Amino acid sequence: QVQLVESGGGLVQPGGSLRLSCAASGSIFSVINMAWYRQAPGKQRELVATIISGGSTHYADSVKGRFTISRDNAKNTVYLQMNGLKPEDTAVYYCYENLVHTRGGPSFQYWGQGTQVTVSS
């Protein structure tokens, strides 16, 4: 079993910055891809950013140029640096990891518990 533990959310003023972290623990052979999603009240969960094992990244149009996703493979940790935050970025942010437990084994998907990000003056 794998646990994803998120940290770094909170309240920030418009234009401010936050850095989210998500550390995975448990039986992990390798992580295929990691991502951050978010869900605002009354809206569907949406993909914010993703990073694959080779380091390639993809961002939602709404966060391009403001958010940066990165990973530390040795620590099985994914980060989301959020700059220039806007009120519309307010949401619960969830990390996601797609990983394998053993060499040649199937992949499994895991979610963090979510961390609240509120952007307000």
Image: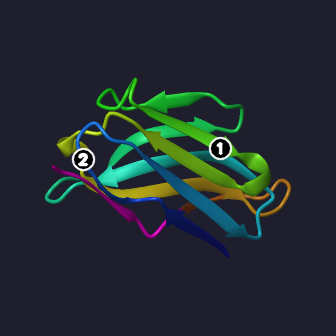
Residue 111 or residue 15, whichever sits in front: 15
Q: Position of residue 17 (x, y in %)?
A: 38, 42
Q: List x then y, in percent, for residue 53.
A: 70, 38
Foreground residue, 80 or 16? 16
Question: Relative to residue 47, is residue 67 depicted above or below?
Answer: above
Q: Nearer the viewer, residue 67 or 15?
A: 15
Name the spot of residue 95 as percent of width and height, x first.
Answer: 49, 56
Is residue 49 visible in the rendered image? The answer is: yes
Is residue 36 located in the magenta-colored stretch of the structure? no
Nearest to N terminus: mark 1 or mark 2: 2
- The residue range painted magenta reads 111-121
Considering only vertical position in the picture, is 108 above or below 120?
below
User: In which image quadrant can residue 63 be found?
Assistant: top left
Lateral position of residue 30 relative to residue 96, left or right: right
Instruction: Tell me how far mark 1 sits from mark 2, CA to CA.
Output: 26 Å
Q: Which residue is mark 1?
A: 71
Percent across and percent down for residue 94 are: 42, 58
**Which residue is identified by label 2?**
13
Secondary structure type for disc 2: loop
Magenta stretch contains residue 118: yes
Identify whether 85 is placed above or below 23. Answer: above
Label 1 is placed on what type of residue?
Arg
Q: Residues within 10 Å of mark 1 (few under 14, many from 20)?
A: many
Eyeballing the image, is 121 above or below 4?
above
Amino acid carrying mark 2 in the image: Gln
